[in-house]
Amino acid sequence: MDDVRLFADEWITHFADKARASKRKSLASSLVVIVATLLVPLLVSYGHDDWLAKVVPSVLSAGAAGVTAWLQFRGFSDKWRLYRTTQRQIEAELAAFDFRFGNYAGLSDEVAARQLAERVTMFQLHTNDGWSAIAEQSKPTELTKSDA
């Protein structure tokens, strides 16, 4: 029974780490975009020379556009939500297993352990399917002759 608990705990840690990394990337990138886009009009309005009034705002705008596209392309916020949801689902499943409620009420230790392993595996597979959908959305689309 300790093996199945360790199995579930390892997946909880795995998804918590992935959620934390995706959250950090999403928030840091969003902050870069916000700061850059807020600075552009200030520099254009109050820049004292061509360098501050034209070059720097252009670079900031291009950078903000690039980071925005990268955020959209990589889907960090979607991955963050997916991984955090899976983490919480496994935590809830583990609580039901530990306290024998829900799907685990009245089950023997062996049956409950097998069911927990199956459910955690299904959450992991479901998350992989969700990740695949996010990755598929991130692929660049190919133009065909009819699109052009």
Image (tube, rainbow, N blue to C red):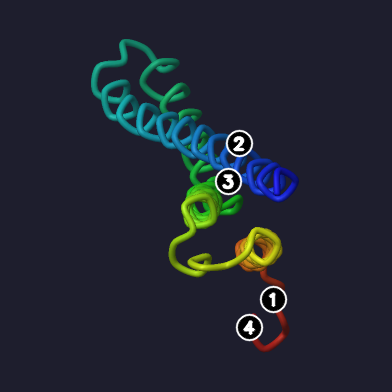
Between the residue at mark 3 and the residue at mark 2, the CA separation in whole angstroms equals 21 Å
List x then y, in percent, for residue 106: 51, 68
Residue type indicated by callout 4? Asp
Residue type indicated by callout 1? Leu
Mark 3 vs mark 2, foreground winner is 2
Mark sitting earlier along the chain (4/3): 3
Residue type indicated by callout 3? Trp
Residue at mark 1: 143
Mark sitting earlier along the chain (3/1): 3
Residue at mark 4: 147
Mark sitting earlier along the chain (2/1): 2
Mark sitting earlier along the chain (3/2): 2
| Labelled pair 1, 4 in contact (Cβ < 8 Å) | yes
Residue at mark 3: 70
Mark 4 vs mark 2, foreground winner is 2
List x then y, in percent, for residue 26: 49, 39
Helix or strand or loop: what does disc 4 sit on? Answer: loop
| Labelled pair 3, 1 in contact (Cβ < 8 Å) | no
Residue at mark 2: 17
Helix or strand or loop: what does disc 2 sit on? Answer: helix
Who's the residue at 47% across and 23% down the image? Answer: 55
Between the residue at mark 2 and the residue at mark 1, the CA separation in whole angstroms equals 37 Å
Helix or strand or loop: what does disc 3 sit on? Answer: helix
| Labelled pair 4, 3 in contact (Cβ < 8 Å) | no
Residue type indicated by callout 2? Asp
Q: Is residue 28 above or below residue 67?
A: above
Between the residue at mark 3 and the residue at mark 1, the CA separation in whole angstroms equals 20 Å
**For the residue carrying disc 2, how many other residues have a C-alpha within 10 Å: few (<14), some (14-19), or many (20+)?**
some
Q: Is residue 59 above or below residue 145?
A: above
Between the residue at mark 1 and the residue at mark 4, the CA separation in whole angstroms equals 6 Å
